[in-house]
Image (spheres, rainbow, N blue to C red):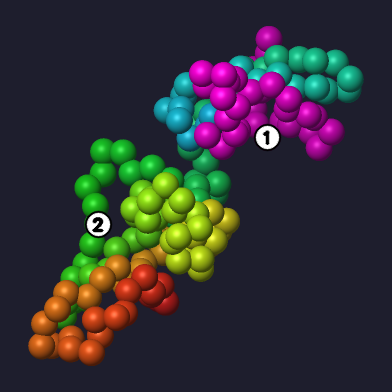
Amino acid sequence: MGGLDPWEFTRYDVCFAVPFRNRERITFDHLVTMKKPGETSILSVLRDGIEQEFSISVRPVSSLQPLVPVHQFDKLPSYYIFAGLVFVPLSQPYLHEYGEDWYNTSPRRLCERALRELPKRAGEQLVILSQVLMDDINAGYERLSEFQVLL
């Protein structure tokens, strides 16, 4: 079993055996996001017709971090309130508040960006207007929510 840098995969390698979780198939993304930096995982790869096992070490790669964070462990929620308008950075836990079927019930634009986009620069966040707190100063804006803020 050799050590493998993820960048050493060739275009013809086939990763075909990823560990199961209680007899349930998991995706490679799940395998990697549930590991702490520095932990290792064993992958079976078919390379040049020969099955090989590789030990990969998980490490943070800023260019591969999603635009919308998947997990928010040990981090307090971030928000900004101005004139009763509540702004928050979008996160997948926020989308999960739409229930078990969050993929189909959350706002489509936000869901698609959360799952598919990568940041264009370090530290970039997708900020949304989460809700409007009722007050005379923002009368008429009560129906605005779930809108992306363009910066």
Q: What amino acid type should be assigned to the residue bearing mark 2?
A: Ser
Residue at the far top in the pictured view: 1
Residue shown at 73% from the left, 25% from the top = 16
Residue shown at 36% from the left, 70% from the top = 146
First along the sequence among labels 1 and 2: 1
Identify the image quadrant of the C terminus.
Answer: bottom left
Residue bearing mark 2: 78
> Which residue is at the front of the view, 6 or 103?
103
Residue at the far right in the pictured view: 49
- What is the number of the mark on residue 113? none
Q: Is residue 13 visible?
A: yes
Give how far across and how far down residue 109 sits, in percent. Answer: 51, 68
Give how far across and how far down residue 40 sits, in percent. Answer: 53, 20
Q: What amino acid type should be assigned to the residue bearing mark 1?
A: Trp
In the image, which residues are magenta?
A: 1-30
Left or right of residue 95, residue 41 in this image = right
Identify the image quadrant of the N terminus.
Answer: top right
Left or right of residue 101, residue 83 in this image = left
> Which residue is at the front of the view, 80 or 144?
144
